[in-house]
Amino acid sequence: MGEVYGGIDAATIAAMMVAERAHYGATHPDAAARAGAGLPGFYQGVPMHWMRDWPMPFPFLVAQATGASLTDTDGHVLADFCLGDTGSMFGHSPEPVREALTAQAGRGLTYMLPSDDALAVGGLLTRRFRLPHWQVATTATDANRFALRVARAVTGRRRILVFNGCYHGTVDETFVRLIDGVPVNRPGLLGQFTDLTADTRVVEFNDIPALEAALADEQVACVITEPVLTNCCMVLPDPGFHAALRAVTRRTGTLLLIDETHTISTGPGGYSGAHGLEPDLFVLGKPVAGGVPASIWGFTDDVARRLDAARAATPAGHSGMGTTLSANALTMTCMRATLERVMTVEAYAHMELLATRLYAGLSDVIAAHGLPWHVVRVGARVEFICAPGPLRNGTQAEAAHAGPLEQAIHLALLNRGVLIAPFHNMMLVCPATTAAQVDTLVAAFADVTRILAQGKVTVGRV
């Protein structure tokens, strides 16, 4: 028997990929003509290199995206469960955000001074996320980088700790992982000129003894973590893990940074609000301004007091935090609209209901075909994993990846009118998602898994 991915032999997967690529090429003539050889002027034919991670032979061109639907220039209307990999988690161009954006366009876009919207947003953030001090950045990467700089400044410690398999944007210090139990710089990292393992410790998620041992010498400034590992095969925390994490960080004087950029899918206050977590620092990016680039980072009174002291003892000069376009007027008005009128309790109730429906539908399909897969959910975020579960750490999550199989499934779903994230098997339900769209996704998934399970791929389907 040949190589197998997720219980499916490689020959079946390869045959599906050939058939689905042929179908895609035949049904996307406009994209083929204009983007088939790459978009002119861009490195590798795309304006941002991650756009090459999609499984299709060439990208389609988006004509319009509204709510939970996306239309390409070949006229295909897709049920969008990728939603810009969380950037449009509350739907494409929510009406309140669109109105705010249009109104602000006539008042100026950026002036490095606060506005009435900024006055409102500070209070909204404090009430929603239960921390008193906030700053605005442009991306979650920026916010995490600035928060880690603050953590080092107020603790006087150099080191941080991450969990194996973590993802915090492109923050250098977090690109460390375990291979055979040994910390190494993450493979594939380009242009890195220092050994990140010198000041970053890495342990497995859910491993409390390893965490305690890594923090015992009181040399770690900050633990940075998502409440759930999400940018891999999703890993949920064990019962009691977060309580133990908070206890050991407090005992060792280590700050705790919770990055909710993906887990904001849990509820209006994120996973932290829903589960009573008590971070010292908090980061949220991607969807917080309804699709306009923005992020926020907040911290406690204690961190603020210590930061004031650190700044007072430091000569005047560049702090290494903030960028010119951070907290611009356009960002602030869109963030206000999102917090006040989009990220509502009612919206989350709708998302939770349909995400539960999606979780159940996918689980039923997997069970019907006897596949060794499982489904996991965090609020409106759902993921099918082509391996048995549940997973407990980053090493298990990496082993669960089935790249060729996942790519074939993604392309087959696209050809059946459904878009999910290209990087892994992530799906998001937004306030505009309908029950019919969820059912379309489940039906497409059922068709694709049936073909894979039976090993009967039809080439030439158009």
Image (cartoon, grey):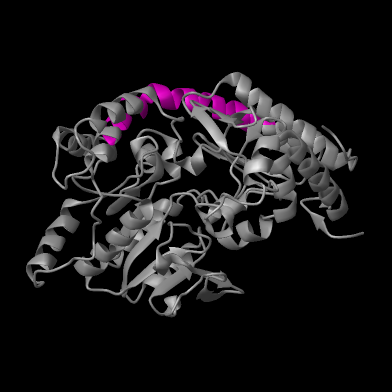
Q: Main secondary structure of the magenta part?
A: helix
Which residues make up the magenta segment? Answer: 335-361
Q: Is residue 193 left or right of residue 98?
A: right
Q: Quadrant of the C terminus?
A: top right
Number of numbered discs: 0
Q: Is residue 75 left or right of residue 295?
A: right
The image quadrant of residue 149 is: bottom left
Q: Position of residue 173 (x, y in %)?
A: 40, 69
| Residue 428 in view here | no
The image quadrant of residue 448 is: top right
Q: Position of residue 423 (x, y in %)?
A: 59, 50
Is 346 included in the stretch rendered in magenta? yes
Is 330 included in the stretch rendered in magenta? no
The image quadrant of residue 366 is: top right
| Residue 404 in view here | yes
Q: Position of residue 265 (x, y in %)?
A: 45, 37
The residue at the point 30 percent across, 48 percent down is: 278
Q: Position of residue 431 (x, y in %)?
A: 46, 25
The residue at the point 17 percent across, 67 percent down is: 318
Q: Quadrant of the N terminus?
A: bottom right
